[in-house]
Image (tube, grey):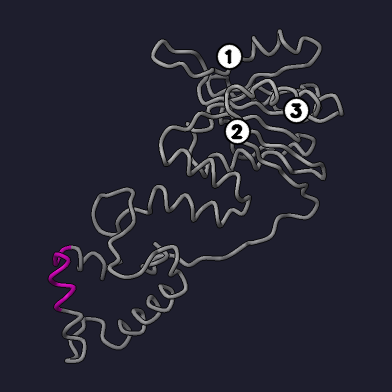
């Protein structure tokens, strides 16, 4: 939408003051115990921990670890810690109570689904384990990681995963390489694509013959401004010098598409 001039972009490229560093790690299943040790160490020094799961309950069709069962398992494993549970099937009042308890440090370790993805600000939370990280989108992983590192303490984000597809491996690599939201968004765009301007395709890079929507962002901004200037001078492309552009548009798009674009 920004390439074709429907929206402008404002850039906020600094974190709020007082944010701590986040170190991100990728652990295979065999290193799960190490992840738990890191989480426990953080609790022992007075910090709090999130452990995030992709599903609420177990299913016969899936071998994914689920929040409800793992809450029971981890409550038994860490019997001297206060373990909380948060998921989307809980009533709003229940969820609010859990989050208040976590914020008031009545909970040491919060077992959760992606309901904590946005809107949760616990400055004392310094570690997050994301189970089956390959099941989450890149922007979702980045937003989840943003729930920690909100205080001055060094924080740890641990991705436990067994990525099989190239896209899943790319997402994990991007998370390990950067915490820059702009770079994460670019990587996400490369993986999923922005979809079409005309038509119903929801993902995949648009059909630009020469430019690359990510690499040539500056050049595309210049081209967009040139297009706006052209429309101001000759809205319906009736001048002889613009005949070639008009003919090209008519050959590529239907009159209905062009009429819709001119109205917008």
* Residue that mark 1 sits on: 68
Residue at the far right: name it: 45
Please give the name of the residue rendered at 56% of the width and 57% of the height, measured from the top-left corner.
Answer: 182
Residue 93: percent from the left, percent from the top?
Answer: 63, 22
Depth check, front residue: 233 or 34: 34
Identify the residue under disc 3. Answer: 38
Across and down, in percent, residue 167 comes to 42, 41
Q: Which is nearer the eye, 128 or 8? A: 128
Disc with the residue nearer the chain's start (3 vs 2): 3
Q: Secondary structure at mark 2?
A: strand
Q: Residue at x 55, y 56 (%)?
A: 183
Residue 51 in the image: above or below residue 1: above
Q: Within 10 Å of the Cα at label 2, are there few (<14), some (14-19), or many (20+) other Cα atoms?
A: many
- Magenta span contains residue 70: no
The picture quadrant where one finds residue 145 is: top right
- Mark 2 or mark 1: name the one nearer the start of the chain: 1
What residue do we see at 71% from left, 22% from top?
Answer: 36
> Which region of the structure is painted magenta?
247-256
Badge 1 density bin: few <14, some 14–19, many ≥20, Cα 10 Å? some
Is the Cβ of the residue at disc 2 closer than 8 Å to that at disc 1? no
Q: CA distance from mark 2 to mark 1?
A: 19 Å
Where residue 241 appears, as percent x and y from the top left, is 20, 91
User: Between disc 1 and disc 3, whose residue precedes?
Assistant: 3
Q: Secondary structure at mark 3?
A: helix
Position of residue 31 relative to residue 80, above or below, is below
Quadrant containing the C terminus is bottom left
> Which residue is tagged 2?
159
**Quadrant in the picture for residue 252:** bottom left
Kindly indicate whether the residue at mark 3 contacts the one at mark 1 (C-beta within 8 angstroms).
no
Kindly report which numbered mark, 2 or 1, lies closer to the viewer in this rendering: 2
């Amino acid at each position: 939408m920004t390439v074709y001039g429907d929206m402008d972009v404002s850039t906020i490229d600094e974190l709020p003051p007082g944010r701590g560093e986040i170190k991100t790690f990728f652990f295979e299943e065999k290193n799960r115990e190490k992840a738990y040790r890191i989480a426990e160490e953080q609790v022992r020094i007075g910090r709090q921990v999130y452990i995030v799961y992709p599903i609420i309950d177990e299913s016969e069709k899936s071998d994914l670890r689920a929040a409800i069962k793992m809450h029971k398992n981890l409550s038994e494993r860490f019997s001297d810690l206060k373990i909380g549970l948060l998921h989307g099937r809980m009533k709003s009042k229940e969820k609010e109570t859990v989050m208040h308890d976590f914020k008031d440090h009545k909970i040491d370790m919060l077992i959760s689904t992606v309901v904590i993805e946005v809107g949760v600000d616990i400055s004392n939370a310094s570690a997050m384990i994301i189970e089956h990280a390959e099941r989450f989108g890149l922007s979702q992983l980045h937003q989840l990681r943003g729930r920690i590192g909100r205080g001055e303490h060094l924080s740890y984000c641990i991705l436990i995963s067994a990525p099989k597809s190239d896209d899943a491996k790319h997402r994990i690599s991007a998370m390990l390489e950067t915490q820059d939201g702009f770079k994460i968004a670019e990587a996400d765009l490369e993986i999923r694509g922005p979809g079409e301007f005309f038509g119903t395709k929801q993902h995949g890079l648009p059909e630009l013959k020469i430019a690359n929507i990510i690499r040539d962002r500056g050049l595309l901004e210049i081209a967009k401004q040139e297009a706006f200037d052209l429309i101001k001078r000759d809205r319906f492309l009736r001048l002889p010098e613009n005949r070639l552009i008009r003919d090209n548009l008519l050959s590529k798009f239907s009159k209905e598409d062009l009429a819709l674009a001119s109205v917008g």
